[in-house]
Image (tube, coloured by chain):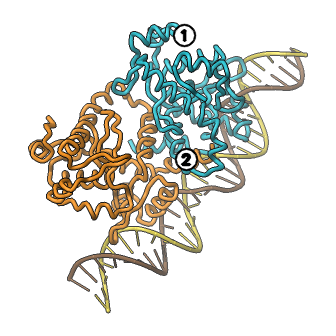
Chain colours: A orange, B cyan, C brown, D yellow
DNA sequence: TTAATACTTCATTATATACTTAAGTGTCGA
DNA sequence: TCGACACTTAAGTATATAATGAAGTATTAA
């Protein structure tokens, strides 16, 4: 057991791999080239490291044409990353993190979908309008909901074809309620970023709801996020 | 920031250092020689590694005569160790391993408090009886709970005065749920050991629930641990 | 006082693995 | 269909650092 433990830890500990894992904390998937630039190394090298991370099941890849998008394979990974980060000396978490937590609590990306208070509200809104409903361990989209998602340019059938789970509930650590995850949650967040409803803060998982977003949330989800 | 992160992770990742950190998970402090035997290496080598871990503020030393006792410098360290351990692949698969892991999964110490199935059940029991309740990122003790803890000889006010966090939720890698950590969790485990509810297995983090303990868990926590 | 124990320090060696150079796939657009 | 691009694979090199050997400091017990 200690051997496996040590393997994982040293897998995370290499400078280049640490940078990769760090970069992914913002919830986006990145291509090998992007990560090579970020980590300031060559494509061959980053490729080798990414390969190791995938083999260790810390990352997973998704091919899209000639691009390969890398991301965490599961939510435990960013959780462990943050646990290690909390060990950085002189990280006076008491004062600083409490302040930082505030907006993060409110609205943040969790892996690749929306979490925090806004994420939960949004999911509640979808449930209330019966665009989605809960079924055992997943969410299902109603007929009405499918039309609604389509009106936002989100193709339900296309998402269902993906290997990853379609619409799973993800427990929110700050709200203690479920928010919408899976490919549907990801597609929704993507849409919202593209349309400028929310904006990513630099180097953080905090999301900012724009004025446009506030209006849109009210119009489409019937929720007041203020 | 990524550099410090990588330094910490690779500090944990070295095979010998990983063994050290792993051994300390049972909550006891160890001497350099003991750790050298455990990690199957020479005194010089273990000394060098221990030195690095102390410099990185992951461990602290206490001299007692010609012995030097090493232990975690703070509670965040074992938390991070557990978070990394939760990434070990195939943790919930393969028949054989399930059998091997059984006692450890069932009941074990996590640094200085109780984890595993029993630890989670116990925490759930306390929540259900409303002796503790969750508040943001920590547990709080109710008035009723305070009286209950006092009846076990645990002084809440005394524990709250300690520097370390009082009652924080700690994610359990085998159960994927939170169990009670912090000084309250430690005091509870201590009480349970003193009263002979649980017993430490030699050279392992496995805890054995005694017959007396089974009865006591039912009486005090209203849970059936069998 | 002496010898043994517990542990550390320093200089040297050994080795694992990250990186480089070179040569490939497969995909896309002109 | 060609060339540029995104990325991977394979073989060889370089380097960081873990392990060793030798020597040294406290501490205890005889």
Residue A190: give its label: none
- Residue at (14% x, 54% y) in the render: A195
- Residue at (36% x, 50% y) in the render: A23
> Where A212 falls versus C1 (above or below)?
below
Q: Mark 2, residues whose alpha carbon is within 10 Å: few (<14), some, or many (≥20)?
A: few
Q: Secondary structure at mark 1?
A: loop
Give the residue at mark 1. B152
Whether residue A142 appears in this view of the structure is: yes
Callout 2: chain: B
Question: Would you say A29 lies left or right of B177 here?
Answer: left
Q: Position of residue B79 (x, y in %)?
A: 50, 33
> Where B119 falls versus A210 (above or below)?
above
Q: Quadrant of the N terminus of chain B?
A: top left
Q: Position of residue A8 (x, y in %)?
A: 54, 48
Between residues A126 and B71, which one lies in front from this camera angle? A126
Question: Would you say A107 lies left or right of B113 here?
Answer: left
Gap between marks 1 and 2 measured at Cα: 35 Å
Q: Position of residue B178 (x, y in %)?
A: 46, 31
Of labels 1 and 2, earlier in sequence is 2
Residue B92: give its label: 2
Q: Quadrant of the C terminus of chain B?
A: top right
Q: Mark 1, residues whose alpha carbon is within 10 Å: few (<14), some, or many (≥20)?
A: few
Q: Position of residue B151 (x, y in %)?
A: 52, 7
Between residues B219 and D21, which one lies in front from this camera angle? B219
Callout 1: chain: B
Question: Would you say B87 lies left or right of B212 here?
Answer: left
> Where A55 falls versus B164 (above or below)?
below
Cβ atoms under marks 1 and 2 closer than 8 Å: no
Q: For residue B165, which quarter of the picture? A: top left
């Amino acid at each position: 057991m200690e051997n496996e433990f040590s393997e994982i830890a040293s897998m995370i500990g290499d400078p280049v791999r640490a940078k990769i894992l760090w970069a992914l904390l913002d919830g986006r998937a990145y291509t090998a080239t992007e990560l090579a630039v970020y980590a300031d190394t060559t494509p061959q090298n980053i490729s080798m490291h990414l390969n190791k991370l995938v083999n260790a099941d810390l990352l997973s890849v998704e091919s899209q044409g000639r691009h390969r998008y890398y991301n965490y394979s599961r939510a435990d990974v960013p959780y462990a990353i943050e646990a290690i980060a909390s060990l950085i000396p002189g990280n006076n978490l008491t004062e600083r993190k409490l302040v930082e937590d505030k907006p993060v609590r409110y609205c943040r990306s969790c892996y690749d979908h929306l979490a925090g208070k806004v994420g939960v509200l949004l999911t509640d809104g979808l449930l209330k309008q019966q665009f989605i409903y809960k079924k055992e361990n997943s969410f299902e989209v109603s007929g009405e909901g499918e039309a609604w998602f389509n009106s936002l340019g989100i193709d339900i059938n296309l998402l269902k074809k993906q290997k990853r789970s379609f619409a799973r509930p993800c427990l929110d650590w700050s709200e203690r309620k479920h928010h919408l995850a899976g490919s549907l949650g990801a597609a929704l967040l993507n849409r919202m970023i593209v349309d400028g409803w929310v904006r990513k803060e630099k180097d953080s998982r905090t999301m900012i709801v724009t004025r446009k977003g506030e209006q849109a949330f009210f119009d489409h989800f019937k929720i007041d996020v203020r």
